[in-house]
Amino acid sequence: MFSELNAKLAEVEGKVRKKRKYQVQLQDFQRELKGINDRISQLEEEWHLEKGDVEKLEGITITNVFATLTGTKDERLSKEKSELLEARHKLDEARKTKKEIQESMEELYEKLDSYSQVEEYHLQLLNEKEHLIKTGTSPEAFKLFDLSEQEGKRQALKTEMKEAIQEGEQVIATLHQAKASLEKANNWGTWDMLGGGMVSGIVKHQHLDEAETYLHQAQREMRQFQKELLDLRQEVKLEIDISSMLRFADFFFDGFIADYMVQGKIQQSLDQVRSESRKAQDIVMSLKEQVRQTEQDLARISKAKRDLVEGL
């Protein structure tokens, strides 16, 4: 009777914790969605302004006539078209991010729906436990309940930390791929500046395209990693402010895409990717150490339970 109830309590407490985690994640996604909507509005305005600048130079306007007469039309048009392309690219990436956030929120709503009755079931089991204690169970049985409760909480914590570790390792792997592509682009860019010709320039931009794909993937994975860490803040020791992790998104939008054509900016992007990778590695290492400590706690609790049962 006791062992069956303890097992049910451990299982349902894990579900209660999961539901709380999903609720915290959803709140953070809602905050992010508001931020990305503001960002999209800003980028749409910038894109329309850049589009207007190009149209002024291409149409029959005073700006066009003046630029033609002064011999600066082609240079200015090329610059404005480049800025228009950059603005459009940033806007497309922001919209893609918004779509990913909305999809993640939909997944969380579905998960939360499956946990809608979990608190009621948890309360029912707690009432059963209270009834057993009040009806004259021995002090040893009460102690066994207490140990089982500790065990369930630590097991749930261990599960969440391992889930966060899995997300973090995926971030690290993707950043490693981005780093490899940026390093290749950097090397080919150096060769291009030394007179490598058209082929070196083409290869460089192929690697930059690869890096951009990996960076967007890393941004998405970093967001999920950060969400996994949200509910662990009160229980695990992390030396990094996890809210800063999503600043990687700002780097992605405003740094890499805007300037990757400039050779020096490729190196800056490479340095940033290495920095983000180190941060993720530090967090994963810290979590693994705390998983190890939690496993030691679980082993001690398990031994205490065995000793208690053997003494009954």
Image (spheres, rainbow, N blue to C red):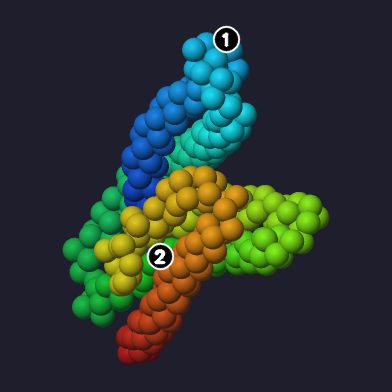
Left or right, 288 with respect to 233, comes to right
Residue toward you, 149 or 231? 231
Mark 1 Cα shell of 10 Å, populated few (<14), some (14-19), many (≥20): few
Q: Earlier in the sequence, mark 1 or mark 2?
A: 1
Left or right, 239 with respect to 40, comes to left
Q: How much space separates mark 1 and mark 2, taking CA atoms?
A: 69 Å
Residue toward you, 178 or 146? 178
User: Would residue 285 be seen by someone viewing this image from the given angle?
Assistant: yes
Task: Name the residue located 59 percent from the left edge and 58 percent from the top edge.
Answer: 263
Most distant residue in the front direction: 70
The residue wearing badge 1 is 60
Picture layout, residue 93 above or below residue 273? above
Picture layout, residue 218 above or below residue 59? below
Residue type (three-letter) at the residue carrying disc 2: Ala
Quarter in which the N terminus is drawn: bottom left
Q: Label 2's element?
A: helix
Task: Name the residue located 78 percent from the left edge and 56 percent from the top edge.
Answer: 197
Q: Label 1's element?
A: loop
Residue type (three-letter) at the residue carrying disc 1: Ile
Please provide percent x and percent y for residue 104.
50, 42
Task: Name the residue located 50 percent from the left edge and 26 percent from the top edge.
Answer: 50
The residue wearing badge 2 is 156
Please provide percent x and percent y for residue 245.
40, 57
Picture layout, residue 254 above or below residue 199? above
Please provide percent x and percent y for residue 244.
35, 57
Number of callouts: 2
